[in-house]
Image: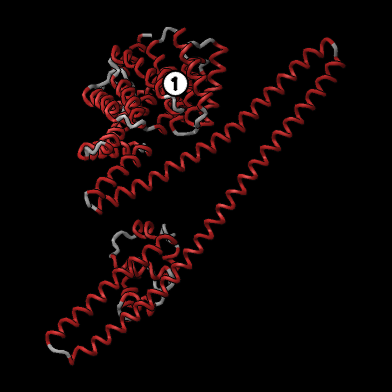
Amino acid sequence: MKKTILLFLVCNCLFCHAQEKQVDSLMLLINQTNSSLQKAELSAQLGRVYVMQNNLDSAKVYYSQARNIYRKTDSLFAYTQNTMRLGNINLAQNNHIEALKIYQECLSVSNENNFKSLIPHLYNNIGLVYKQIEDFDDAKNNFQEAYKLFLENNDEPNSVYPLYNIALIESIVGNDEDAINRYLNLTTYHLKTENWVSLASVYNSISEIYLKNEDYNRAKEYLEMALNAIEDKRDSFNTGPSSFYEASIYTNAAELYFKEGEIDLAKKYASKGIKLSKENSYKLNIFKSAKILAEIYDNENEVDSSLLYYKIYIDFNNQYQDEYDVKQLTKLKMQNEFDEILRQNEIDRIYQEAEYKNRELRYIGVAGFSVLLAVILILLYINQKNKNAKLKLKEENLLLEKKKLNQDLEYKKKELASNMMFLMEKNEFITSISKKLIELKPDAKKDNKDLIQQIINEIRQNSSTKMWEEFEIRFKEVHKDFYNELHKTHPDLTLNEVKICAFLRLNMSSKEISAITHQSVKSINMARFRLRKKLHIDRDENLIAYLKSLE
């Protein structure tokens, strides 16, 4: 017993050191101890450390290890608690179906064994799953049940979380006044407990509502209180990382100050928001901040910076939309799975009732059960048939959309080919003009000779630059991944070498490339030879086939 207490105290002391040291120390203790329960406690503690480091995959490994040991030692409460933590990780990783299954299992075990301290947390977490997939009615019902149970357990600190979640849902569905009142009720508790991170999050949520309604003065008032709470205080109450709340507040500040015309402050908080969000992959905050910075730099005529942030905005906006589509598909899948569970539960209930009645009146019970079961199966069949029809319709729509995308791509390919022919004809025309000017040059006066040469140079330079820009725009529409793969595989290529690679990707001959670039065929062949060496392509290997393989 003394050894257990001593080991527990050592673990708590280690938690006060730097997190990397803490991880190494806990791993060492896990390897050294022979006690199964001590190994489980240390594994769970290490899982919490990894959660605070945002290393969820490693946290999942050690929570699973702790759970398995607790199951073998019949420590049912600890087993259920660590299983719930695995559900929390799945929820954070957007594995909604797996998270909900875990929470339902834990809730069943907790109800059977009267684990009162876990049950309200499970209802709150189930509510979070439904909120994530935008099933707000079920989410709100679960949050209300969690709040009621927290109060029954006299657990005031945790009771504020379902209240915050309910306020958030009211804000999402447009009940702004109710949401603000709920948020304001929470501020009293957070001030009393000095829970600054949660207080900052509440103030920021109120500010976002006022910003949405274009009440900029009130929005700024609550934003400044949020910034003060998150930047000037250190939260000893919060046990996890506060980066998500900070990033959300900075993004909100950037948007508000930008709309108010306070550009320096907008730029400051957008930069802080995007830095923090990129470190933690908060996609929504990344593309919001990037859009603001792109518009600011565009207004300041800083083209390079504006283009950089527009690209970030487009990339992360697409990722966010992809995740939104996944949420919608997940919602459909969850509905199908839980319909199946409900149907199975209903069938099980009918079997139990039939078995009970069978003891009293066997033949009547069997006949009644058969009729009822037949009706249920018919209804299930009809219901499933309708769902299959809907899924089939959705698949057909997806196929049509895919067909349209393929048609668009074919059109762009044809457009690229037409553009190439136009550029070659245009270049031949420009070359013809240049030749005529060269022929005139010997007979011209000295001053005119210089002018003619200047005109020739400007024609070639401008035509080459503009033609390349026109070509590159259409090329990227058809082969959008080619440049990325080329730069990733061969980052040391020059601009001229990249151009040659693009032309070769279209299977253009040296003569055709020469007609567009104003270089001689001999120069093009020499460039291809140098390019082959730079790309490490053997003489018997096809250069064009290699470039095509990069997509």
Closer to the camera in the image, 412 or 16: 412
From this viewpoint, is residue 34 visible?
A: no
From this viewpoint, is residue 412 visible?
A: yes
Report the residue at 22% width, 75% height from top: 458
Quarter of the rendering containing residue 230 = top left
Q: Position of residue 385 (x, y in %)?
A: 71, 38
Q: Position of residue 43 (x, y in %)?
A: 40, 24
The quarter of the rendered structure image containing the C terminus is bottom left
Q: How is the image coloured?
A: secondary structure
Element type at mark 1 = helix
Q: Position of residue 2 (x, y in %)?
A: 35, 9
- Compared across the picture, whether 17 is left or right of 101 comes to left
| Count of numbered circles in the view | 1
The quarter of the rendered structure image containing the N terminus is top left
Quarter of the rendering containing residue 11 = top left
- Give the amino acid type for the residue marked by disc 1 in the picture: Ile
Which residue is denoted by mark 1 in the rendering?
166
- Crowding around mark 1 (Cα neighbors within 10 Å: few <14, some 14 to 19, many 20+) is many
Report the residue at 28% width, 37% height from top: 259
Closer to the camera in the image, 551 or 218: 218
Instruction: Give the residue at the far right of this rendering.
Output: 363
Quarter of the rendering containing residue 283 = top left
Report the residue at 40% width, 70% height from top: 504
Closer to the camera in the image, 38 or 255: 255
